Amino acid sequence: MKKFLTFLPIALLANPFDDLVNAYNQEDYKTSYDIASSICKQTCSDINLNLIMGKSAFRLGLYDEALAAYDRVLVLDDTNTEARLQSAIIYQKNGNLALLKLELENLKDDERLNDDEKALVASMLKNVKYQQKVNNEINIPYASIGFGYGYDSNPKKQNLKDSYLPVPQLGINFPIPGAKHQPASSILANLNAGYKKQVNNVYDYDININFYNKYYIKPIEEDFQNLSVFTASINNGFEISRQFKLNILMSYDYIILKQKRYLNTFTADISGDYYTESGLAFGLGYTINHNNYLIEDNKENDSNHHSIYAMSKIISQRSMSYLKIAYDIEKTSRIKESSNNYKEYSATAGIIYMLNKQVILKASLGYAKSKYDEKIFLNTRNDITYRVNFGAEYNMDHHNFFSLDLGYNRVKSSIEYNSYDNLYTNLMYKYKF
């Protein structure tokens, strides 16, 4: 940081100007800014006075006031490289790419810059051009089509082992035979399309429609749960500051289940993410789902699901590690007492690692503890769930993608026949237009 004692005119070294210089050189930026503001009320036409005022304001996080001081310098001397460089740094902090690029273009060939300043300008200009390219790619329609193969060792998610149910009133354990079915293969299909746009420096949106289908093909005689889901959503992003972003998601799902059951799901989610300069990020969010069956015979299963969650991330150039903690409540909306009502605490930790420009690796580990309202012969249902997942994605040429997911879920329930294990595999091919 430059010291200004030798740059100020002699006329400024009488009180209060010597107090201003002393405060700035002692890094007392609050005092130096207050003194400079007081002087500026009487006369604000000195270049060095405004430079001190701008740098003091910057140190205090008063970026608008700092820019105003540097603007006064440039009115007095439009070739002042220090004012232009300091203005560029502020534009970079507040994300004003257009003005940042303009300042850097004016500075890049200035011979008065030293080697360190030239390197800084070149690096900042390179980053600006990259960011503008990224922003241009945001304002595009997108679409993809995918299909693949799925495998489930326990597609019905039932206990395959013999178990028993305690009946305290009779002093016996009622035997329950394990479910008898085989592992199953399925065909997976996915269609996705949308449009995302960066409207301005604050607001962006992403409108998306998606169709997913899972159809079991082997063994065909089993009554497995085929699944078809159509989703329409809009995600609204508000970049409140360079470090904080607010997201509001609204979506609608139309789900086709077996036995001609049709389900509407309406979802609203609001979350906020705070990013630090060191690569740490913290987020809080709330989600509400309303599940509505279309056929009257299934209306007793209509429900509302609430989720409150917190997430922390460590972001580096090639990886992102995260930890998510959530609390969920689901209750039927038409029936006050239902065995489907539950509360759940969960935690998930994971990592996404970019091995190179074409390969991304993923891994996650999850734990959940659920308490249901369900009671059978005084036995209250409490479940503990463990989830392990590994995945990889190969980007062949920005259009052709291959992905593999391997996962294992284990549920241990206090009502033993609700316990189960499921090992699954999904292999997908996706073409992005």
Image (spheres, rainbow, N blue to C red):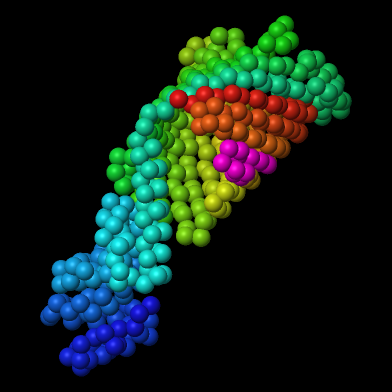
Q: Residue 29's x, y, as percent? A: 34, 78
Q: Is residue 373 magenta?
A: no
Majority secondary structure in the magenta region: strand
Q: Is residue 282 left or right of residue 354?
A: left
Residue drawn at the location 35% of the way across and 46% of the way down = 132
Picture coordinates of residue 255 (x, y %)? 52, 18
Q: In the picture provided, is 245 more to the left or to the right than 298?
A: left
Q: Is residue 373 above or below residue 282?
A: above
Residue 298 visible: no
Range of magenta residues = 352-366
Which of the 4 image quadrants contains residue 107? Answer: bottom left
Q: Nearer the viewer, residue 34 or 278?
A: 278
Q: Residue at x 31, y 47 (%)?
A: 201
Can you name the residue that lies furthest to the left here? 42
Which quarter of the rendering shows the C terminus? Answer: top left
230, above or below 412, in the image: above
Is-magenta flag for residue 353? yes
